[in-house]
Image (cartoon, rainbow, N blue to C red):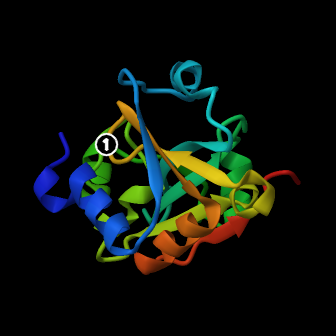
Amino acid sequence: MASEAKGGRSALIQHLDDMKITYEIVEHPPVFTVEEMMPHLRHLEGSHSKNLFLKDKKKKGLWLVTTLAERQINLTELGKKIGAPGGLRFADESIMIDVLNVAQGCCTPLALFNDTEKKVTFVLDEGFVREKHGRVFFHPMVNDATMGLASSDFVRFVESTGHSPVIVNLDE
């Protein structure tokens, strides 16, 4: 299980508070898929996420891919689109815990602040940076809550982690 000492939910909240980023948190039962999550969050206006922690097959580079929740992702096509050598596959949970300090079912781009060695390439669905989405929602390091923040604050948060998102248009 992920360790709070490295940077869990309370450390994330402190980081956001230090940045003066406003957020809302909705508690819900633990969920492991978008399908399980949505009945608890349908009332929230904004964009919900699907997050995939992947590695490429040749160089074993790490990729955190955040897409709009309703997207169907073809890993072969995504790998070609982002230039992942040899294609993409899911990374082991132990790597996700070591690098991002989150366990399976809790994957979130908000965990990028734990990737101090910049081992992860962050890929963001262009849909999240369109102004029409307003608020964006992610797990706050745990899968029994969802955190919403303004899309502009989310981009500012990601930049504070030292990660430059690779913005990908997944509509094409």
Which residue is at a point 67% across and 44% down the rendered structure image? 47
Residue 45 percent across, percent down from the top left: 68, 39
The residue singled out by tag 1 in the image is 93
Residue found at x 55% / y 78%: 164
Write the residue at 60% across / 59% down: 150
| Residue 96 image position (x, y, % from top left) | 32, 51
Quarter of the figure with the C terminus:
bottom right
Task: State which quadrant residue 169 falls in.
Answer: bottom right
In x, y percent, where is residue 108? 44, 50
Q: Classify residue 92 as left or right of residue 152.
A: left
Task: Give the camera-side residue of 136 and 170.
Answer: 136
**Mark 1: which amino acid?**
Glu
- For the question of whether residue 6 can be seen, the reply is yes
Left or right: 161 as drawn, with respect to 5: right
- Compare residues 97 and 90 and report the one nearer the observer: 97
Quarter of the picture holding the N terminus: top left
Rate crowding at label 1 as few (under 14), some (14 to 19) or many (20 or more) other CA atoms within 10 Å.
Answer: some
Residue 99 in view here: no
